[in-house]
Image (tube, helix red, strand yellow):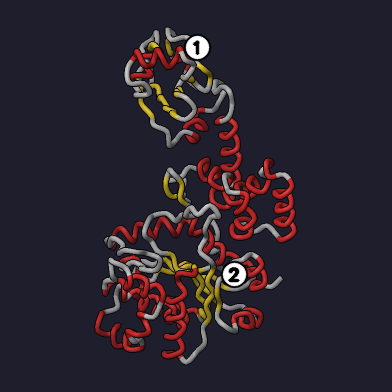
């Protein structure tokens, strides 16, 4: 299957320019995608464009990941209802460094013959003075042309309007395409469907300045069948950085994929072939309760982002989460599973603390009398085991690995107690 046909089968082509298929078939071409450094980590919404670049490279074409050290100082208005907060140059540079390290997990920058490239548009945008830029680039775009673009039109129709700063973003992106065309022969830009206006602006500028043809391809913006914004949970954004989103919670995010979305996500976010994905689709239809497709998706994406070892840890930690007791659990696994739970550092005297006193101290109960009532009613669990005696004392021997205790009230309210060293 050639690259374009595979992308179409994977439902990754929302729109494309005429002639792209012939250009891809004629020989290796160079394509790029830009990544906006609004944070020091990319998130799961960034995976689809990252994997587009990886698929391009695996098909024998040349991939460029462009990080926006220049455009990041402006902010992309596409898909936004209001203006972004401006970042300082130091913040942008720090974010670029974080993104660069993450991209190296997906793109091969060292393969002989066809290494991917990582480029920062700060190299040419930050030194460019305003008057020369307006003469060299701005003169080729009419305001009518720019306001007709969907990303601009929506903002102009909204209550917030559009500042001249963000209005200029399209010109900067178009110039990026010209620079990459000149330096690397790059003739293809890819991205999400919200970038179509910016991409076609770059194609038009190449035509006007260089008399050459360039191409564009955009993928659909990822949504969930349930109408929830992809990559968002009650706990917030799902990041690729393990310090922002633990590998366990990352794995669980994919494992919890709706049956209606899982086959689409297998196409989008894995390199599994057509036969394997179609088999998983049949398995889901026949036995959805087994969640084989979700487990395969979670394993594949977590392995790509965090490595096989973290997949094993996440699955082991999941077993911990649903076990009846945690006495033999690994402390690190418990800390990873309950990283987002409220926690307290507590010093235990040699003879321990009364359970009801500990519950009140960490605010799982408003008072010792309420804690007593909760224990008597069977609503308190210590390390996933129901507490049956309101007179019980909690000692260091009760702690998992002598270091942590998990308290739970009812089904959902959990609190992690870290025991201070003796």
Query: What residue is pinned by disc 2?
Result: 56
Residue 401 in sight in this render:
no
Q: Quadrant of the N terminus?
A: bottom right
Q: Which mark is residue 388?
A: 1
Q: Position of residue 168 (x, y in %)?
A: 31, 76
Residue 152's image quarter?
bottom left
The residue located at (42%, 85%) in the rendering is: 205
Which structural element holds mark 1? Answer: loop
Q: Is residue 247 above or below residue 268?
A: above
In this image, 62 relative to 71: left or right?
A: right
Q: Position of residue 295 (x, y in %)?
A: 64, 45
Residue 308's image quarter?
top right
Which residue is outermost to the bottom?
A: 211
Which of the pair 7/26 is nearer the observer? 7
Q: Position of residue 204 (x, y in %)?
A: 44, 85
Which of the pair 114/307 is nearer the observer? 307
Q: Which mark is residue 159?
A: none
Dot 2 crowding, Cα within 10 Å, few <14, some 14–19, many 20+: many
The residue located at (46%, 47%) in the rendering is: 233
């Amino acid at each position: 299957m050639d690259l374009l046909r595979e992308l179409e089968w994977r439902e990754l082509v929302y729109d494309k320019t005429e002639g792209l298929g012939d250009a891809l078939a004629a020989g290796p071409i160079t394509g790029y995608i830009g990544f906006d450094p609004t944070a020091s980590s990319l998130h799961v919404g960034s995976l689809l464009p990252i994997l587009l670049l990886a698929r391009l490279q695996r098909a024998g074409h040349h991939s460029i990941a462009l990080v926006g050290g220049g455009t990041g100082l402006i902010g992309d208005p596409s898909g936004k209802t209001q203006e972004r907060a401006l970042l300082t140059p130091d913040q942008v540079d720090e974010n670029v460094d974080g993104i660069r390290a993450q991209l190296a997990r997906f793109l091969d920058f060292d393969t002989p013959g066809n290494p991917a490239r990582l480029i920062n548009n700060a190299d040419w945008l930050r030194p460019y003075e305003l008057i020369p830029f307006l003469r060299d680039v701005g003169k080729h775009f009419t305001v009518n042309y720019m306001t007709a673009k969907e990303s601009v039109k929506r903002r102009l129709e909204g209550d917030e309007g559009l500042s001249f700063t963000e209005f200029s973003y399209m010109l900067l992106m178009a110039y990026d395409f010209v620079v990459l065309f000149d330096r690397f022969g790059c003739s293809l830009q890819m991205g999400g469907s919200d970038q179509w206006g910016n991409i076609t602006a770059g194609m038009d500028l190449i035509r006007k300045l260089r008399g050459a043809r360039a191409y564009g391809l955009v993928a659909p913006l990822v949504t969930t069948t349930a109408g929830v914004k992809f990559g968002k949970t009650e706990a917030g954004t799902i990041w690729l950085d393990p310090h922002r989103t633990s590998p366990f919670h990352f794995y669980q995010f994919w494992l919890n994929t709706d049956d209606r979305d899982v086959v689409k996500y297998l196409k989008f976010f894995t390199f599994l072939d057509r036969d394997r994905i179609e088999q998983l689709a049949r398995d889901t239809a026949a036995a959805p309760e087994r969640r084989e497709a979700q487990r395969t998706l979670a394993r594949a994406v977590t392995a790509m982002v965090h490595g096989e070892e973290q997949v094993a840890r996440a699955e082991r930690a999941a077993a911990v989460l649903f076990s009846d007791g945690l006495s033999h659990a690994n402390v690190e696994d418990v800390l990873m599973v309950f990283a987002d739970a409220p926690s307290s550092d507590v010093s235990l005297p040699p003879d321990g603390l009364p359970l009801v006193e500990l519950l009140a101290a960490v605010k799982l109960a408003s008072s010792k009398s309420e804690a007593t009532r909760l224990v008597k009613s069977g609503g308190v669990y210590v390390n996933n085991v129901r507490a049956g005696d309101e007179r019980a004392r909690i000692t260091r021997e009760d702690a998992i690995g002598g270091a942590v205790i998990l308290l739970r009230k009812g089904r959902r309210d959990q609190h992690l107690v870290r025991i201070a060293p003796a």
